[in-house]
Amino acid sequence: AQKVTQAQTEISVVEKEDVTLDCVYETRDTTYYLFWYKQPPSGELVFLIRRNSFDEQNEISGRYSWNFQKSTSSFNFTITASQVVDSAVYFCALSEALGGSTLGRLYFGRGTQLTVWP
Amino acid sequence: GAGVSQTPSNKVTEKGKYVELRCDPISGHTALYWYRQSLGQGPEFLIYFQGTGAADDSGLPNDRFFAVRPEGSVSTLKIQRTERGDSAVYLCASSATLAGGNNEQFFGPGTRLTVL
């Protein structure tokens, strides 16, 4: 079973629109970490954010915001006033802190291709 | 350099050949990870090292794949008897600490492997 599900394969928006990328995760661990990475056309994964399972506070960083809800096992990512430079594939990932040999490895979703049109 | 580097950036080989992919992590990072990313997919974990030892190699698909990190820094991913299905981008990442999974992994640009 997929540990991280990103149901949206592709999203297209026009510049200045807000867009939310969905992420649903699955784990039996009580301590875990959630991540978002951006992969622009150049291919290199860029770290955006890390949250631990004990901190459900939403976070805002400029035009980016994240909504973490343990009750629905979701960690959604919103870009406000999108720009063309936001066009990329965005990955949600999970790291389980317990579990012996799985410590540290990231489980990635399949990614959401975001295209922002001018 | 300041980031994770990988060489070569592209590798084209023929089915059945042996290839080596190199990863140079960020200086001082003790943990090193290999992932494989097929077209249209998210990265899939292969193996990680804590220092010189492979702490988890459960993601290696079969015994044709092997990785080493003899001095706890540079790592080499080795693929024997390559198959067309091995074609993918191989990503390397490193992190400063492995404690509790609270690790920000910094990724390299990847090596695009094409097996003809």
Image: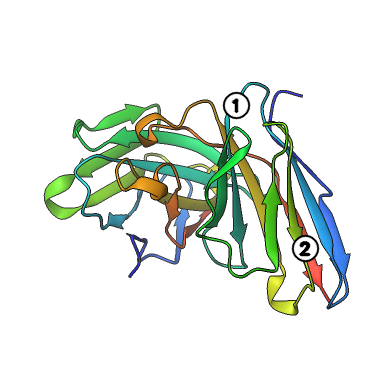
How far apart are the two marked residues, 1 and 2, measured between alpha carbons? 25 Å
Question: Where's the C terminus of chain B, which quadrant?
Answer: bottom right
**Above or below A40: residue B19:** below
Q: Chain of mark 2?
A: B
Mark 1 or 2: the one toward you: 1
Apparent side of residue A43 relative to residue B80 in the rendered image (left or right) = left
Discs 1, 2 touching: Cβ within 8 Å? no
The reply to the same-chain question for discs 1 and 2 is: yes
**Above or below A111: residue A56:** above
**Above or below A110: residue A68:** above
Q: Residues within 10 Å of mark 2 (few under 14, many from 20)?
A: many
Q: Chain of mark 1?
A: B
Q: Position of residue A13 (x, y in %)?
A: 45, 56
What's the amino acid at mark 1? His
Mark 2 — residue? B113
- Which residue reaches farthest left? A71
Apparent side of residue A46 relative to residue A100 in the rendered image (left or right) = right
Mark 1 — residue? B29
Q: Position of residue B36 (x, y in %)?
A: 61, 59
Residue at image x 78%, y 72%? B82
Question: Where's the N terminus of chain B, which quadrant?
Answer: top right
- Regarding residue A18, the answer to whether it shows in the image is no
Q: Position of residue A43 (x, y in %)?
A: 66, 50
Which label is found at residue B89? none
